[in-house]
Amino acid sequence: MTKQYSKAIVISAVSTAAAAAGVVATQSCTKAKAAETEKKPFNIVYIMTDDHTAQMMSCYDKRFAHTPNLDRIANDGVRFTNSFVANSLSGPSRACMLTGKHSHKNGFTDNTTCVFDSSQPTFTKHLQNAGYETALFGKWHLESLPQGFDRWEIVPGQGDYYNPDFIVESGDTVQVHGYLTDLITDKSLNWLENEHDKDKPFCLLIHHKAIHRNWLADTAHLQLFEDQTFELPENFYDDYAGRQAAAEQEMSIFKDMDLIYDLKMDRPDKDSHLKERYHSYIGRMDSAQRAAWDAFYGPMTEEFYAANLQGKELAEWKYQRYMRDYLKVVKSLDDNVGRVLDYLEENDLLDNTLVVYTSDQGFYMGEHGWFDKRFMYEESFHTPLIMHLPKGFDRKGDIDEMVQNIDYGPTFLDLAGVDVPEDMQGVSFLPLLKGEHPEDWRDALYYHFYEYPAEHSVKRHYGVRDDRYKLIHFYNDIDKWELYDLANDPKEMHNIYGQPGTDSITTVMMAKLKDLQEQYDDPIRFTYPIE
Ligand code: SGN
Ligand code: CA
């Protein structure tokens, strides 16, 4: 893939940031023409959640969730069906999308050992230079403080759902009463309404903690989904045959999901290594919030321990509770996305604004028996991506080309008429938003996950995926290759690496992997061809 699509693309009646910065019509222009020339550059509202997976958005999957506001975005805009991350974890994803570079280039490879060098170039800094006003509210999760924003307020680390702390620009920490998803939206809308310089185009990042573990719902939504029983994924009882890394993870709903911390079955006579942490979270609630919480989970806890479930019954009970709590947290998120859309609509901003909704990665909702993410397998390699497009972009419905979160920065810059820096590794997908199907669009994606040894014990791996096959190499304290035929095995249950008849496809995929490692200049290498 060449960089040719990262050049600025101008569509009719659309001016660039330079126009807004003061390029005015000549005296001889008619008034109408002058108005057209001075049309403001596009605004960007970039909403990102944490661990919200496409299976739990009704615009992607109708089985479980009802997300009418997210569906509003998808229904009148576009839905990407092949949207992926570069490294399926929060901090790394955020660093990839800010810099447009893979993890080995932006330096933030994992959540546990890295501090983001905020002085490096990011798309928001480039937008600022082009005259945009930029703001960020919510989760940052990059350890250092943000740079490249005219205004920001972030939660420390993962943030708290209830009565959370915010770090403000002075560096002070301020506790705010309320539910985090509402508060991040309040702050974002307040900035748009009262603080933002309305003469400037804006780029607003609304970055939620929701739907991150441990799924503490707003007390207003506790009763929801309690009468629903959700179908089990067909591979819930995966035996991981032929997949050593999958067998050795610690993200199993049955084995690793904590009854107290994750599923709120808290009682004085019960203990777990995460009990204290659970208490610190619910300890933030005020008395009314806590009373509602205890009234809801208390009786259920008694019933649960009295039933003394074991084996499959316990596994499936855990799955149902997980699904319900997760969906309650989604409900707040969807309502708050609706508030943002309403604001943009009521203030006549929608026609001139790109609204992006995505997540820092996908998530397992019981597939392979798991929660969490990290693996290059489909559910966590994918991330949802839907967009409301500004007027003038006629594209509607599904976009099937493969895109990755390193492409967001280049796309936003392209939309703003700003040249995409050569060292950004992502590619602008603005042509796709215009309805084009560039013939030399990328045909394979690169992935590299580093956080091991660490929580959930997902081994280090890198790999390549094209529209049919996926090749993964698990390394570090293991040396295992996996190959999947996604057409015949979309759930990735059968590792066909080394099987008779797979030599030629392995050779092709190895070559693609090698090319991508060279193209992206990832210092890691493997021997090719391998024995
Ligand atoms: C926390 C969670 C993990 C999760 C990581 C990374 N544990 O450490 O379950 O995988 O975040 O998530 S918890 O006990 O603190 O809830 S990420 O999305 O932020 O990368
Ligand atoms: Ca995440």
Image: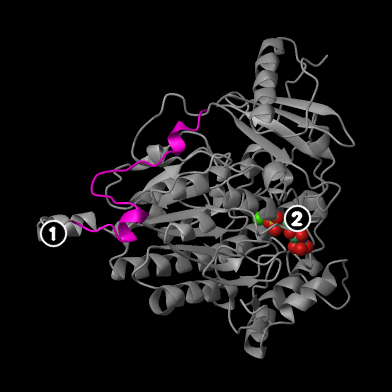
Q: Is mark 2 within 8 Å of ligand 1?
A: yes
Q: Is residue 226 visible?
A: no
Give the residue number, with chain letter if any, for mark 1.
Answer: 27
Q: Quadrant of residue 261?
A: bottom right
Q: Is residue 280 magenta?
A: no
Q: Nearer the viewer, residue 292 or 465?
A: 465
Image position, residue 183 (x, y; %): 54, 76
Mark 1 or mark 2: whose residue is earlier in sequence: 1
Q: What stretch of residues is rendered in magenta?
A: 1-25
Q: Nearer the viewer, residue 214 or 315?
A: 214
- Tell me the element at label 2: loop
Kindly report which numbered mark, 1 or 2, lies closer to the viewer in this rendering.
1
Q: Residue at x 41, y 28 (%)?
A: 438
Task: Name the side, left or right, on which 69 lies relative to 54.
Answer: left
Q: Which residue is mark 2?
A: 111
Specify the amino acid type for callout 2.
Asn
Residue 362 in picture, x, y percent from top left: 61, 48
The residue under the point 67% across, 61% down is: 321
Is 2 within the magenta? yes
